[in-house]
Image: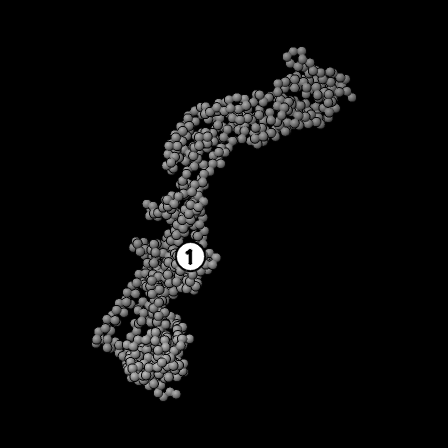
Amino acid sequence: MSMITFDVSQPGDQPILTYKNGENPEENAIGADIALRLNNSTPGTYKQIMTRLQEVHGKEALDKYVNPDALYTINKFYKIKNVSNPWTSSLAAKPPAGEFDPTYYSKQVPEVLQNWKDAQSSVGFGSQSLPDLDVTERYGTPETYLQYHYTTTGKHTGLRANPVQETLAAKAYQEQWKPTDREQQIIRDVLTKPTATGLSLVEQTAERYINTEEESKFRSLVSDTLKQTVNELKKAKWQETQRELFAGMPEFGEIYNMGSSLTDSILGDSGVGGYLNLTGGSRAEEQFKEKFENMIGMGNNVEYNWQQWFDNVLTKRYETLEKIEDPGDAKKQYTLDKEFATRYVKDYLAPRFNTSKSMSEFIGYLDVRDNEQNVLQTQTVANRLKELATLKAESFVKNLGVSGSMHYFDPEFYFNPTGNTAKENQYATQKQIVSDAWEQAKADPNQIVFMRTELGGTTKVTWAQLAYQYGIDLNNKEQFAKLHYETLGKNRNFDGASDMITSEDLVNFIEGDLASALTAAEKNYGSNVFLEFVTPEQVADKLLKTIDPTKTPQAWKDALSKYGITDTNQPVDEIRNLLIQTIRTTPAESIRTSIEELNKQNTTPTQKLLGIEYIQRPEDKKTVTSDTQTSLYKIFQNAGYKGDENTFYNEFMPDVDRSEMELITQGQKGLRVSDAYAGLTSKDPFESIFSMEKLFPSEQESKTQPTKESDATPSYFKMFDDSSDTEYKSNSGKKILDEFTSMFKGFS
């Protein structure tokens, strides 16, 4: 089987491919067709010609008659005729700055790189896959092929020949600034002082998180409660005043106090009073008086059941109230839904009323003025959010004083540097130079900026070249500022950021840390418009639980100093009591002190004793045990006396000097006393009183008694001897003895 043979000659300007005829007609037809098509070929038609030959003659025929030598001659002829002058990088377009980067460019045009890869075997001829000579032979390498694409297409469509160079100097620029105390105060004022709106910047931020309508509705309810409560208290006080007025009139007072007069007469004339004092103390006498006066219908206690008024009048009002009027605008009303009203009574009014001991205390807890809100009084969520915002601002300012503020390149500041008075002249020069350069760059991008020295010599650099190199838009102020600092400004020590706090710092704080804190707080409070009521006891307990005085003594001192407590070495229980007394409102502390004093006297707290404002409750009556019992009181107590020690000296033995009895009691604990003292150890109260009289003899007895040698010996009691008082003591002792003896008649 013969093979097609080709020959290449060049008699003139163009080469000629000739075919040597053989004996096989089919072979001759294929050879002649190949020669004809290639002699008529033009650059870029290789793949088209070879594909057409395969379509006309078929794969098997081409494999049969075209051997490798013939195929080599065909390709050689096509290269000579159509690819004699390959495309080289010397013909490539130069980028405005830098060199062509084929790797970078291929990432922008991945399809072009794929075309090159496909061209290595994209021509089918018989059973072979041949390279496309118009691509592989013309460009030689993938890098050249990509550069050709950039030159003819990419550059005109805006594709870059190399990556953008970062303005590293501007990117890395940072300046840490720490404010002075004066500067900190200026920042604090900017954040927390009221603006023209009446609110500070941080309060304005907090306003975004406040449900203003719900808060207005709540404030209107509180205002209504205050109005209702004050009016009711005024009526009660008027009634109290009228009673006191009439009771003071001679004629009416005699009738008004008839019950008290009758009971006093019965107790005194019958002797029952002394018996009751002995067996049951002042409380027994008090109960007897109350029962008797009530029995005859002449009790004159001033009573007002505030609990009943709260349950049946005040709370019922809000169960049925459908609209509430705005206290600041009578024309504005808010609709009350049942859930809101119920929550108001249950979660707001009830805890405050139940904690209060007087109506003044209750009224104090209802205050909703912004400048008086705290954990004990009403604190709305709105007020708490504003308070939180202010605390957050204070923390921000303090942190600036510790760690400072890190400033990064600021294009606006670079164009117009201000703030540092020590650099006024330098800043003025910087502002002028940067502004002029920008105007020139926009007007004539090809203006020479500077000369660059490279290996090949010195080249001129224009704004257009720099813009391409760093990938910036000369009309973009921010981008131009970075370019100018990178290429010129850093070499002239221009400032890229403020030496003080900037508006951007404040915005970042407000929109960043402050907004995050307020968002979290708002989520925590939910739909509430007022905070949970906190008692002074809870405040004190939380403080004591939070701070350990042994581990953090300074924090302990700082915390207590806020409440005016300077002696921090006291026992924790005493500190707690001091905290509670300090935290409470004045009305709250006053009424509790009065209740405590009455309990010490074993007297039931009543409105008659404490005034009409007192919210009388049975649980306020408490039994107080005295720790300072004198020997005389103990003796009578063991003998059957049921009253407390205060009542014993105030009512049962008013003529006895209690302080002297306390001295005697202390003497019993170890000091040497006279023989007369020995009688006080007796269980018999008569003997004790007799011994007491011997301790304090009358002046006459002292004169008639012989002087003993032992009298000259210093004794504990002679240190406090007062001769002017001896007669009084003697008479008092006799009187006590007589009264006491008469009470014990009939008892063994």
Name the residue carrying label 1: 557
Across and down, in percent, residue 469 comes to: 50, 28
Q: Residues within 10 Å of mark 1 (few under 14, many from 20)?
A: some
Which residue occupies the foreground of this view, 214 or 12?
Answer: 214
Q: Residue at horizontal 41%, vertical 30%?
A: 434
115 shown above or below 608: above
Drawn side of residue 448 relative to residue 247, left or right = right
Residue 105: image location, x then y, percent: 56, 29
Closest to the observer: 190 or 473?
190
As rendered, which of 261 and 730 lies closer to the eye? 730
Q: Quadrant of residue 184?
A: top left
**Residue lying farthest to the top in this orientation:** 11
Q: Is residue 687 visible?
A: yes
x then y, percent, for residue 213: 37, 53
**Which quarter of the rendering shows the C terminus?**
bottom left
Callout count: 1
Where does residue 157 sit, x and y in percent of width and height?
52, 27
